[in-house]
Amino acid sequence: MIGYLQRAIKNCLHTVLALLLAEKRTLVDLKTGLKETALHMAANENCTFAARKLVDVDANLEAVTKYGWTPLMEASRFGHEGVIKILVSAKAAINYQGFHGWTALHLAIRFGHPKVAQMLLEAGANPNLKDNDRSSSGCGKVKAWGAI
């Protein structure tokens, strides 16, 4: 069943997705082999429709993948602003530190998404959190972008 859900999200098949979620509430927090939930998939694929539907049915905002990343971290890595807005407004943990001690802000900066970095900072992301290598999230780069 998770395969059908993955395909519906990947291809933004809104009708199919809505039907799957309506019929199978248990699909919401099922995990793939990499421990990705449907919300991780929506964040990866920039499917705001799926993200909204999943948040509306109380999908776990803080579920972590095999690599310790939350859906907000996934969306930040890829610069998916629409999904980030949904997750931030749903009160996703903005300063969660996953694999390597990285936060969503670390990922937005490392992968070159200044607008996402700005969004996260405005939502309360802490630019002073250090990763496991004792590096901050990249305040110098953020300042150069004019985000802080």
Image (cartoon, rainbow, N blue to C red):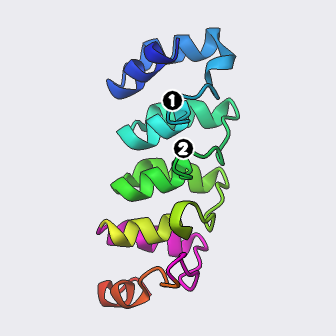
Name the residue tied to disc 2.
66
Secondary structure at numbered mark 1: loop
Q: Residue at x 42, y 71 (%)?
A: 117
Front residue of 65 and 53: 65
Q: Is residue 117 left or right of residue 129?
A: left
Q: Earlier in the sequence, mark 1 or mark 2?
A: 1
The picture places residue 110, in percent across and down from the top left corner, at: 35, 70
The answer to which of 37 and 45 lies nearer the viewer is 37
Number of the label disc, if any, that sits on residue 132: none
Specify few, some or many for label 2: CA neighbours under 10 Å numbering under 14, 14-19, or 20 or more.
few
Which span of residues is magenta-colored? 112-133
Q: Secondary structure at mark 2?
A: loop
Check whether the beta carbons of the residues at disc 1 and disc 2 lie within 8 A of each other: yes
| Residue 99, image x, y percentages | 53, 60
Residue 46 visible in image: no
What residue type is disc 2 on? Lys
Badge 1 amino acid = Gly
For residue 33, the mark is 1
On screen, residue 138 above or below 87: below
Q: Is residue 67 visible?
A: yes
Expressed as whole percent of the image width and height from the top left, the position of residue 79 reads 35, 57
Residue 118 within the segment the image draws in magenta:
yes
Kindly report the distance in space between the C-alpha atoms of the residues bearing marks 1 and 2.
8 Å
Residue 128, image x, y percentages: 56, 86
Which residue shows up at 62% across the image and 13% down it? 22
Q: Is residue 127 left or right of residue 145?
A: right
